[in-house]
Image (cartoon, helix red, strand yellow):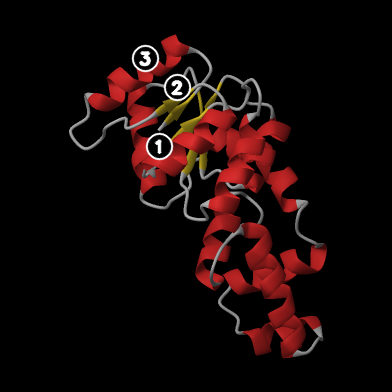
Amino acid sequence: MLVDDHIIVRMGISFAVNNQPDMQVVAQAQDGIEAMEMYRSHQPDLVILDLRMPKQNGIETIALMRREFSGARILVLSNYDAGDEIAAAIQAGARGFVPKDTSLTNLMEAIRRVNEGEEFIPPEIGRRLSGRLASQLSNREIEVLTRLGKGLSNKEIGVALNVTESTIKIHLAHIFAKLDVADRTQAVLKAIKRGIIHME
């Protein structure tokens, strides 16, 4: 599903997508309110969405869509690559971001990867976001994540940080929620990808 208030943009993306052997545009919307109606009707595998739209902006739409449809896969395609906006979009539930001046090859790669459940954030955008996204986590949570990345068990992390194993489990629950992941491996991979922790 394409969500953009500029019909020429939608026409261009629609043409490119429909020329792919494994993709088809099933719905289009020009604002966030229409996007919600279209999603309910068509249940698309993936949504390509602009951030700045009339009536209801992209970030609000992402949050509402993910609240109603927790499995929604959303790729932001926007001219606006200000770190705050992208960070807000990712925090709201978007799985990726590509600027509108991206190459067709890059856009198709982003679509396929987000559809497969991965994140897609260009490295230069990821570097800009890392500080903002890391700031969601407390210093202690980053310490726990770093040791998690080194393969330590909950008990071993507790010993290293001089806290109980149950305290580490609480920290992990907070980390999983903030990073929107289900397990330890996903948490470490996402933290590395976003530059929150670094593996030697």
Compare marks 3 and 2 and give the one earlier in the sequence.
3
Kind of residue at disc 1: Ala
Q: Residue at x 66, y 37 (%)?
A: 60
Compare marks 3 and 1 and give the one earlier in the sequence.
3
Is 148 located above or below residue 93 in the figure? below
Are the residues at dot 2 and dot 1 in contact (C-beta closer than 8 Å)?
yes
How far apart are the two marked residues, 2 and 1, measured between alpha carbons?
A: 10 Å
Are the residues at dot 3 and dot 2 in contact (C-beta closer than 8 Å)?
no
> Which quarter of the figure has residue 154?
bottom right
Q: Residue furthest left?
A: 21
Whole-percent x, y for residue 64 in the image? 62, 44
Residue 102's label in the rendered image is: 2
Whole-percent x, y for residue 68 in the image? 56, 52
Towards the viewer: 114 or 65: 65
Crowd tier of the residue under label 2, counting other residues whose Cα lies within 10 Å: few below 14, some 14–19, many 20 or above: few
> Which quarter of the figure has residue 144?
bottom right
Are the residues at dot 3 and dot 1 in contact (C-beta closer than 8 Å)?
no
Residue 110's label in the rendered image is: 1
Compare marks 2 and 1 and give the one earlier in the sequence.
2
Badge 2 marks a residue whose secondary structure is loop
Quarter that holds the N terminus? top left
Badge 1 marks a residue whose secondary structure is helix
Towards the viewer: 200 or 122: 122
> Which quarter of the figure has residue 53?
top right
Q: Residue at x 69, y 27 (%)?
A: 82
Q: Residue furthest top?
A: 8
Crowd tier of the residue under label 3, counting other residues whose Cα lies within 10 Å: few below 14, some 14–19, many 20 or above: few
Kind of residue at disc 2: Thr
Kind of residue at disc 3: Met
